[in-house]
Image (spheres, helix red, strand yellow):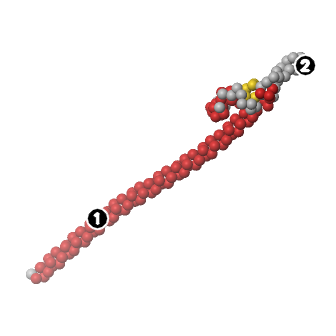
Amino acid sequence: RMDRAVQAKWDDPFLTTEEALLAGGYEFDIPLPSSTSSPPPKDAEGRSVKRTQKEIYDQDGVSIAQRKNNLLRRLRRMKARTAQLQEVQEEEERQRQQQQQQEQQQLQLQQEGGEEEEEGQEQFQVAEEEEEEEKNVVAEGEEEEQSEEEEEEEEEEE
Protein backbone atom coordinates (compact mmCIF):
# COMPACT_ATOMS: atom_id res chain seq x y z
CA ARG A 1 0.00 0.00 0.00
CA MET A 2 2.80 2.42 0.83
CA ASP A 3 4.41 1.76 -2.54
CA ARG A 4 1.13 2.66 -4.22
CA ALA A 5 0.86 5.82 -2.09
CA VAL A 6 4.43 6.82 -2.97
CA GLN A 7 3.76 6.25 -6.67
CA ALA A 8 0.52 8.25 -6.50
CA LYS A 9 2.27 11.21 -4.86
CA TRP A 10 5.23 10.91 -7.28
CA ASP A 11 2.91 10.89 -10.29
CA ASP A 12 0.83 13.80 -8.99
CA PRO A 13 2.85 16.09 -6.71
CA PHE A 14 -0.25 18.23 -6.11
CA LEU A 15 -1.91 15.45 -4.12
CA THR A 16 -1.88 15.97 -0.38
CA THR A 17 -0.13 13.31 1.64
CA GLU A 18 -3.48 12.19 2.99
CA GLU A 19 -4.87 11.82 -0.54
CA ALA A 20 -1.80 9.84 -1.58
CA LEU A 21 -2.21 7.52 1.40
CA LEU A 22 -5.90 7.05 0.57
CA ALA A 23 -4.95 6.36 -3.06
CA GLY A 24 -2.51 3.75 -1.78
CA GLY A 25 -5.34 1.90 -0.05
CA TYR A 26 -5.11 3.13 3.52
CA GLU A 27 -8.30 3.73 5.48
CA PHE A 28 -8.20 6.16 8.37
CA ASP A 29 -10.45 7.34 11.16
CA ILE A 30 -10.65 3.88 12.63
CA PRO A 31 -10.56 3.97 16.44
CA LEU A 32 -7.84 2.06 18.21
CA PRO A 33 -8.93 -1.41 19.41
CA SER A 34 -8.32 -0.42 23.02
CA SER A 35 -10.69 2.54 22.74
CA THR A 36 -13.53 0.85 20.83
CA SER A 37 -15.95 1.32 23.70
CA SER A 38 -15.44 5.08 23.92
CA PRO A 39 -17.12 7.36 21.41
CA PRO A 40 -15.20 10.22 19.76
CA PRO A 41 -14.48 13.00 22.26
CA LYS A 42 -16.91 15.92 22.45
CA ASP A 43 -16.59 19.41 23.83
CA ALA A 44 -18.83 20.97 26.51
CA GLU A 45 -21.46 21.89 23.94
CA GLY A 46 -21.61 18.37 22.50
CA ARG A 47 -19.64 19.01 19.31
CA SER A 48 -16.97 16.56 18.19
CA VAL A 49 -13.50 17.62 19.14
CA LYS A 50 -11.05 17.69 16.28
CA ARG A 51 -8.48 14.97 16.74
CA THR A 52 -4.80 15.41 15.98
CA GLN A 53 -3.04 13.33 13.35
CA LYS A 54 -1.54 11.30 16.15
CA GLU A 55 -5.05 10.35 17.25
CA ILE A 56 -6.27 9.17 13.82
CA TYR A 57 -5.37 5.57 12.99
CA ASP A 58 -5.53 3.23 10.01
CA GLN A 59 -6.79 -0.36 9.99
CA ASP A 60 -3.37 -1.56 11.25
CA GLY A 61 -3.44 0.78 14.27
CA VAL A 62 -0.76 3.09 12.86
CA SER A 63 -1.38 6.83 13.16
CA ILE A 64 -1.81 8.96 10.10
CA ALA A 65 1.16 11.04 11.32
CA GLN A 66 3.42 7.96 11.18
CA ARG A 67 2.12 7.00 7.73
CA LYS A 68 2.70 10.53 6.43
CA ASN A 69 6.24 10.55 7.85
CA ASN A 70 6.95 7.22 6.19
CA LEU A 71 5.50 8.45 2.88
CA LEU A 72 7.54 11.67 2.96
CA ARG A 73 10.73 9.77 3.92
CA ARG A 74 10.28 7.42 0.98
CA LEU A 75 9.61 10.34 -1.36
CA ARG A 76 12.82 12.05 -0.19
CA ARG A 77 14.80 8.86 -0.81
CA MET A 78 13.21 8.45 -4.21
CA LYS A 79 14.00 12.04 -5.09
CA ALA A 80 17.63 11.63 -3.95
CA ARG A 81 18.02 8.43 -5.99
CA THR A 82 16.48 10.10 -9.01
CA ALA A 83 18.84 13.07 -8.62
CA GLN A 84 21.83 10.72 -8.34
CA LEU A 85 20.72 8.78 -11.38
CA GLN A 86 20.24 12.00 -13.30
CA GLU A 87 23.74 13.17 -12.31
CA VAL A 88 25.20 9.86 -13.47
CA GLN A 89 23.32 10.09 -16.76
CA GLU A 90 24.44 13.70 -17.26
CA GLU A 91 28.06 12.73 -16.55
CA GLU A 92 27.82 9.83 -19.00
CA GLU A 93 26.33 12.21 -21.59
CA ARG A 94 29.18 14.71 -21.02
CA GLN A 95 31.74 11.94 -21.43
CA ARG A 96 30.02 10.70 -24.58
CA GLN A 97 30.00 14.21 -26.05
CA GLN A 98 33.68 14.70 -25.17
CA GLN A 99 34.52 11.40 -26.83
CA GLN A 100 32.56 12.41 -29.94
CA GLN A 101 34.37 15.75 -30.04
CA GLN A 102 37.73 14.02 -29.72
CA GLU A 103 36.82 11.58 -32.49
CA GLN A 104 35.69 14.46 -34.72
CA GLN A 105 38.92 16.34 -34.03
CA GLN A 106 40.97 13.25 -34.85
CA LEU A 107 38.98 12.75 -38.04
CA GLN A 108 39.51 16.38 -39.02
CA LEU A 109 43.23 16.07 -38.34
CA GLN A 110 43.37 12.92 -40.43
CA GLN A 111 41.45 14.61 -43.25
CA GLU A 112 43.68 17.68 -43.06
CA GLY A 113 46.72 15.43 -42.97
CA GLY A 114 45.38 13.57 -46.02
CA GLU A 115 44.78 16.84 -47.84
CA GLU A 116 48.29 18.00 -46.95
CA GLU A 117 49.63 14.67 -48.15
CA GLU A 118 47.70 15.04 -51.40
CA GLU A 119 48.96 18.60 -51.77
CA GLY A 120 52.48 17.37 -51.01
CA GLN A 121 52.13 14.62 -53.61
CA GLU A 122 50.79 17.12 -56.15
CA GLN A 123 53.66 19.49 -55.39
CA PHE A 124 56.11 16.59 -55.69
CA GLN A 125 54.61 15.64 -59.05
CA VAL A 126 54.78 19.24 -60.25
CA ALA A 127 58.38 19.44 -59.07
CA GLU A 128 59.21 16.18 -60.87
CA GLU A 129 57.53 17.45 -64.04
CA GLU A 130 59.44 20.72 -63.82
CA GLU A 131 62.65 18.84 -63.21
CA GLU A 132 61.91 16.63 -66.19
CA GLU A 133 61.24 19.70 -68.32
CA GLU A 134 64.52 21.23 -67.17
CA LYS A 135 66.32 18.01 -68.08
CA ASN A 136 64.65 18.08 -71.47
CA VAL A 137 65.62 21.71 -71.97
CA VAL A 138 69.18 20.98 -70.85
CA ALA A 139 69.27 17.91 -73.06
CA GLU A 140 67.96 19.92 -76.01
CA GLY A 141 70.54 22.60 -75.23
CA GLU A 142 73.28 19.97 -75.12
CA GLU A 143 72.04 18.46 -78.35
CA GLU A 144 72.07 21.87 -79.96
CA GLU A 145 75.58 22.49 -78.64
CA GLN A 146 76.67 19.10 -79.94
CA SER A 147 75.12 19.72 -83.29
CA GLU A 148 76.72 23.17 -83.39
CA GLU A 149 80.04 21.65 -82.41
CA GLU A 150 79.61 18.98 -85.04
CA GLU A 151 78.77 21.62 -87.59
CA GLU A 152 81.82 23.61 -86.56
CA GLU A 153 83.98 20.49 -86.77
CA GLU A 154 82.55 19.71 -90.18
CA GLU A 155 83.25 23.26 -91.31
CA GLU A 156 86.79 23.05 -90.02
CA GLU A 157 87.33 19.78 -91.83
CA GLU A 158 86.19 21.30 -95.05
Residue 141 at x, y percent in the picture: 23, 72
Task: Measure the C-alpha gap from mark 2 to mark 1.
Answer: 119 Å
Kind of residue sitting beneath label 2? Ala
Residue 115 at x, y percent in the picture: 39, 57
Res. 74 visible in picture: yes
Tell whether 56 sits left or right of 8: right
Mark 2 or mark 1: which comes first in sequence?
Answer: 2
Query: Quadrant of residue 118 in the image?
Result: bottom left
Q: Which residue is mark 1?
A: 129
Kind of residue sitting beneath label 1? Glu
Residue lying farthest to the bottom in this orientation: 157
Tell whether 9 sits left or right of 111: right
Query: Quadrant of residue 27 in the image?
Result: top right
What label sits on residue 70 in the rendered view?
Answer: none
Q: Which residue is mark 2?
A: 44
Q: Residue at x 70, y 39 (%)?
A: 73
